Amino acid sequence: MNEEQRKQQAQIRSEEANIERIKNTSSEELIAKYFHAEYEPQAPDIKKARKRRKEDIQFHYDFSIPEDMQRIGEGKKFLIRTYGCQMNEHDTEVMAGILSEMGYESTNVTEEADIILLNTCAIRENAENKVFGEIGHLKPLKLEKPDLIIGVCGCMSQEESVVDRILKKHQHIDLIFGTHNIHRLPHLVKEALFGKEMIVEVWSKEGDIIENLPKVRKGKIKAWVNIMYGCDKFCTYCIVPMTRGKERSRRPQDIIQEVRHLVAQGYKEVTLLGQNVNAYGKDFEDIEYGLGDLMDDIHKIDIPRVRFTTSHPRDFDDRLIEVLAQGGNLLDHIHLPVQSGSSEILKKMNRKYTREEYLELVRKIREAMPNATLTTDIIVGFPNETEEQFEETMTLMEEVGFEAAYTYIYSPREGTPAARKKDDVPEEVKKQRLYRLNELVNKQSAESMKTYQGEVVKVLVEGESKKDPDVLAGYTERNKLVNFKGPKSVIGQIVEVEITDTKTWSLNGVMAENRVEVE
């Protein structure tokens, strides 16, 4: 049998299989597949999400804007509203880059925009409510400007319930796409421009890694550098593994090249970004290379400051601690989410470490970097959290000496195991616990700030203070906000500032050469 005959037989077998599959498919399934735009309903499913890890990820270096879309936006403007984490901010930079290459110009004025994208967050219910509120507010503008394209993207778009709600109740939305197909934006805009139906393209499979996507970065001083995507930890309260997919790391050479380009453009600080950043490299099969190795390589690049976020304590290994202890441009401000101080609650959260193991990690970090600044994330009111378990969180907060913390009342997310748990903690009790925790966080932050009184710190000046245009603002190596008076010419530079006054969350000071105090 020759090659042509083999191809013909394979095609016949494929056609026979398709006929058999259609015979066994219900009419409802056929309608859903072929007449429900491009959206195939699929709720977050832990078991399916775990199985996705077996699929190979491809790397692509050939992104380009289709020729017929390269100038489609000339004379038009876009606006992207971003909700959520640094990953969403970085996705917005990519989408802004793509739209700019299509000829669109950025605007902050809603009424001027020809495309409005809502880049959404699914972590907490409050963020979701804000987005639906904004969707409602945009309806009158859509009626006034029928050619306006309104799109919803980001993590909320990966949830079946969200997409169904938009399809049923918000027909003025033109475009819905997820976190894995941002590179398809030119094609999706084209369909929205020339089609009559709502365009829905949400991939349940993670996207491959597209390396040469354009970006319009926010500012010219600090930059996010994505080093990996997704998360494999499956904490019981968290929707991220379903909205962002499995962990998949960029190749080291691509990251290092991006950092070198940023240095050449004059950037002073980069933050290496990932949903679980210190799991970087664990998915590599051809090399042994983790976050510690990457940080060690970037340590040799001539850029003043390198940070990373967000860590998972389980993946914070000795190699990373060893490399960070070198200092230099590797900053010793470490954000290390603990979520709870109770081993029992941590087990229910599926965090896969105990209170004792977390404290041992902190001990190692302190031993290698005695002056390290530690900050964290904490959830209060997890289903059935007792008063004793909450008190364990309070004592952990004190024992570690966190200098800041992002604190939240537990918010159930549909599709997560924790959302199925019966919760017997009254809402008022949860609010009281959050209040008590925040009092402690404020106290520890204020105490840590007082240690800077009279000290001279290095501040990367980012611009004018939000409260006073005559005052400059920037951050220290340990991520402390400093306000001081100085010439606008130092914006974008690292300057020495003597601290003259300390507050709970910020410091006031004077430049070493310019002792004009901030009032």
Image (cartoon, rainbow, N blue to C red):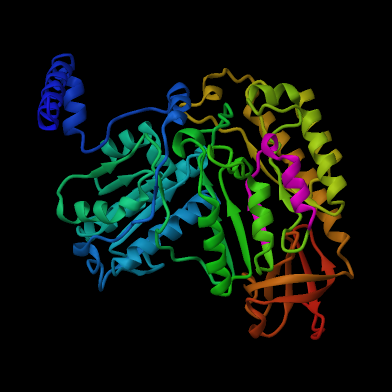
Q: Residue furthest front?
A: 1
| Residue 292 located left or right of residue 47 | right
Q: Position of residue 139 (x, y in %)?
A: 29, 52
- Residue 283 higher or lower than 384, as above or below: below
The answer to whether residue 394 of the structure is visible from this angle is no
On-image quarter of the C terminus? bottom right
- Residue 60 higher or lower than 123, as above or below: below
Which of the pair 416/277 is nearer the observer?
A: 277
The answer to whether residue 122 of the structure is visible from this angle is yes
The residue positioned 34% from the left and 67% from the top of the image is 100
| Residue 353 located left or right of residue 234 | right
- Residue 157 higher or lower than 214, as above or below: above
The residue positioned 29% from the left and 70% from the top of the image is 103
Tell me which segment is drawn in magenta.
306-326
| Residue 194 located left or right of residue 230 | left
| Residue 363 located left or right of residue 95 | right
The residue positioned 82% from the left and 55% from the top of the image is 446
* Magenta stretch contains residue 319: yes
* Magenta stretch contains residue 98: no
On-image quarter of the N terminus? top left
Q: Position of residue 179 (x, y in %)?
A: 41, 44
Q: Residue furthest top?
A: 24
Q: Position of residue 374 (x, y in %)?
A: 77, 48
Q: Quadrant of residue 25?
A: top left
Q: Position of residue 406 (x, y in %)?
A: 67, 45
The residue positioned 46% from the left and 33% from the top of the image is 242
Which of the pair 233/464 is nearer the observer?
A: 233
